[in-house]
Every structure is written in C-alpha cells, then in structure tokens.
Image: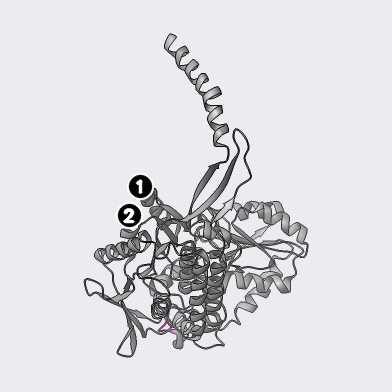
Amino acid sequence: MTQTESIPTFGLYINGEWSAASSGATETLYNPANGTPVAVTARATVADVDRAVAAARHSFDNGSWSDVRHTERARIIEAIADLLEEHTDELAELETLNGGTTLRKSSWLDIPVGIEHLRYFGELARQHPMRPLPFIDFPMASSNAMWREPIGVCAQIIPWNYPFLMAIWKIGPALAAGNSVILKPASLTPVSALRMAEIIHESKLLPPGVFNLLTGAGSTVGEHLIAHPGVDKIAFTGSTDVGRHIAAVAGRNLKRVTLELGGKSPVVVLPNADLDIAVDGAIWAAFMHSGQSCEAGTRLLLPDSLHDEFVDRMVARVEQLVLGDPMDLTTDLGPLVSAAQKRAVDQYILLGLEEGATLRCGGNAEEPELASGHFVRPTIFTDVNNKMRIAQEEIFGPVLCVIRYHTVGEAITIANDTSYGLAASVWSRDLNEAQEVAHAIRAGTVWINDHHLINAKAPFGGYKDSGIGRELGPQALEAYTEVKHIHTDLTQERTRRIWVDVVAPQLDASFTEMAEM
C-alpha cells in the first residue's frame, strides 16, 4: 500500500508480491456517507487473472501448502488470526469508511467475529484428513478409509456488504483444507480485504502463490476466473442471477461450486410471542446494516391478534433510530453502499406504493446533513400481499413488508411462498410450537427468538434459489476437499483362492454359454 494524496493506493497481490495492473488502470473508491475519497485500487485485466491462476496453480502443484501437515496449517492460520486481531481497530475503521456500515457494528461484530471464525477454521484444519470406515469382511476382509484431499485452485468471489467477514468465510476453509486461493473482493468494498492481504504478506506465513488477491470489474476478473481451466472450484456469495450464470459456466468444465445467494427471509411472530422481545427482534432482523444482508428478515408475518399493536410499537421504535455518520458510535444506521443501490431501493419504495401497500414510515432521508451520502430511512410497509413484488424480490435495503395472517398454518404457507430459502426466524413463548414451525419452514437457517446470529460451528446456506452447498461448520471444510476411498485387502491368499476356485470358473461358464447362443 502506498499513499496518494493522503489516501491509500493498493495494487494486486499475486505470487507473494504486490504489483500494478498490467494496464496500469486504477479506480478511486468513495465513502458512501459523504462522498470523500477512501482508496485507490488496481483494475486487473485478463492477463493479470492468468498470472494469478498460474501462481496459484504452481503453488498447489508443487505442494508448498497442500503437502504441509494439517497441524502446521492450523498453526499458521491461527497465527494469521492473531495478527489480524492486533489490527482490529484499523480494519474496523476501513470497513466503515469503505462500506458505510457503522463503526459500532464493524468494531464489535464484523471484524471480531471474522477473526473468531478464522480461528475456528484453524481448529478444522487440525482434523486428520483420514477417517476410518467400518471393517469389511465380505466378500473379503479389508481395511477401508475415507481420505479428504484439497481440491486445488479455488477462486473466491465475495460481495460488498460484509467484505472482511465474507473474505474470511472463503479463504479460511480453503486454506485449512490445503488449497491455493484467488480472492476477488467486490469492486465497491475491497479495502479491508486488501489490508488483510498486506498483513498476511508482511507475516511471510504463507508460501508465495497460496493466497492471491485481485481487484477489478466482475465482468472482467470474475468472468475469466469462473471460465479459466486452471481453476478447480468457484465459491461465490451474491445475487441469485449471477449465481445461476456462474453455475452454468462452471458446469461446462465440471468445476466444484459453492453458491450462497439471495434471500427474502420471513420473520414469523406467533400469537403468544413476547412483544417486548419480538418488536425489537423484528427491527433487528429487518434493519441491521440498513437491510443490506442476504438473510435479512424483510417479510414480517403478524397474526390478527397482534398486528395493530405490534406495528404501532415498531413504527414508534424505528422512528427513534439514529441515521447518520457511521463513524459516530451513537449512529444506529449508516448509508447504503452506493448511489446505484440507493436508486434501486428508492424504486422499490415507489413500487410498493404503486402496488397498494401502505407506507407507515421511512423513505428518503431529507436532512441537509445527509444529502452527500446514500441514506434511506428504515421503511415499513403494511397491507402487503405476499404476491407483491416488494414481498417476493430481494430489495437489499431497509424496507420491511408486514403481512397479516389468520392461522399458524397460513403463516407457514406464506413463509414458504417464495423462491428463496436462506433463513427465517420464529418468535414465541412456546418453544415446542416454535420448533414445529421452524421444522415446517424450508430454509437453511431458522432462528427461534433471534435473527442474524451466525456461529462458525453451524452450517450456513440456503434451499431453493438461495444457493448450493453450505459455508461454516464442518461442511465448510468438506466443501473444499475431494473424497478418496482407500481400500486395503487384508487376505491376499484368500482372495486368490476365491478368484481361482469360484469367480473364474463362473466367468468361463458364462462366456461359453454366451458363445453358444
């Protein structure tokens, strides 16, 4: 990293070295809260992608990391986590300046949680790659084992909403399994991942080519990575439409894929819910990070008996939330990530009105002090029909759709009436009933009396259009390995006798019989 007019300038990280893009092209990034410059990044070309793939391929094929003992890989990953922890405050500030999330959130959640998740992947790396299978004695005595091996070169494309955390989710299990990686951060928010790469580089803990980072346009860098014959696996977090495209391109070469895609998560409040808990829970589910979370609870399902009081209490609470400078620790909600994202959210708010929903609060932030940023107030629609576009399409902004239901069975039907299945939450004093509803909802994660709580030890991913595969948990490590079955015959003499005395005569008889037909 160098300094240009007091803002950092980052290159590409390839084969253990920093370099400019082959074209020399750069891009200036701006703070979404006030429009001031934050950093300058390189715009990689197809030639740069080829260089990164060649470096990753060489590092994998020569075994500089893939052949390292699993316990040593664990030690190195844990050492990297320790170094990142020393830079928590710096990384949190970069996350806020670049992406607009509040400093309160990046300091207390995004960066610390990401580092703890990396430590968990270090724990996973300690697992021996061989797992014995049950003894087999028929038709012959044998010893069997399942051996997990790294896949190879893994291209990892992450979104703009949680840049540090998503980088950890990708590189952590890939490195733990022994792969070489090429990380492609989102063009809008690469700065914390770039600083992480600098810390890794300065540590000299990873061999050259094992970890590479490319910034630039997805249409150039991402497209070439997903089609490149030297890449063995693609991991992507982002929109469902892009995920479908990646799956189609990767499928031509039978590349392995992990796709964590969109969501339209229901928040199901049961009639016996504790309103003091559920109201705040619904606000947290919908508006954390200004609704820019794939698992955000943007469809609130309320029973007739609670609907009016619940909405009134929620609107009063939401109107007290502080919208403003994300660097201020008293701020509850920062800006959206870009002008384009704000325009998209504004259009959905207009669409909701056109569809006949009732706007109870929210919309554009009109305060003069917020005019230079991409701010949208937390928005609540009532009188929403689940067939409306605002209830079916992922808005990725602070827009909550309130849907009334009459019976719990109807609530389950509405919850499942979506093309997505990433997450959901159920709110109730009766945990048995809540468990029944949770089992009936088709989603990869269902919280009871909580939302957004993601633990590194539990798998995360979705049903239906919300993706393929799981991240986190033991499944994360499995997603970055190939499985090999190793069979060892323990009775060679017995095997020979069975072949000579039993199998071969039967084959001879069969061949003679076929010849006579």
| Closer to us: 57 or 418 | 57
Badge 1 marks a residue whose secondary structure is helix
Which x, y percent locates residue 169?
50, 67
Q: Nearer the viewer, residue 217 or 375?
A: 217
Amino acid type of the residue tagged 1 in the rendering? Arg
Q: Quadrant of the N terminus?
A: bottom left
Q: How is the protein colored in the picture? A: one colour
Give residue 56's mark. none
Q: Quadrant of the C terminus?
A: top left
Residues at circles 1 and 2 in contact by the CB criterion of under 8 Å: yes
Spot the residue most to the front.
Answer: 493
Majority SS type along the magenta span: loop
Tell me if residue 467 can be seen: yes
Which residue is disc 2 drawn over? 227
Q: Is residue 433 above or below residue 216?
A: above
State how far apart marks 1 and 2 are (Cα).
9 Å
Q: Is residue 77 magenta?
A: no
Identity, as a three-letter code, of the amino acid under mark 2: Ala
Across and down, in percent, residue 464 comes to 53, 51
Residue of label 1? 252
The residue lying at 44 percent from left, 60 percent from top is 235
Which percent across, then down, holds residue 69?
Answer: 49, 64
In the orientation shown, which residue stands out farthest toward the bottom?
A: 6
Task: Give the number of marks.
Answer: 2
Residue range (magenta): 371-375
Vertical arrangement, residue 78 with respect to residue 440, above or below: below
Image coords of residue 414 (percent x, y)? 62, 54
Residue 517 shows up from this direction: no
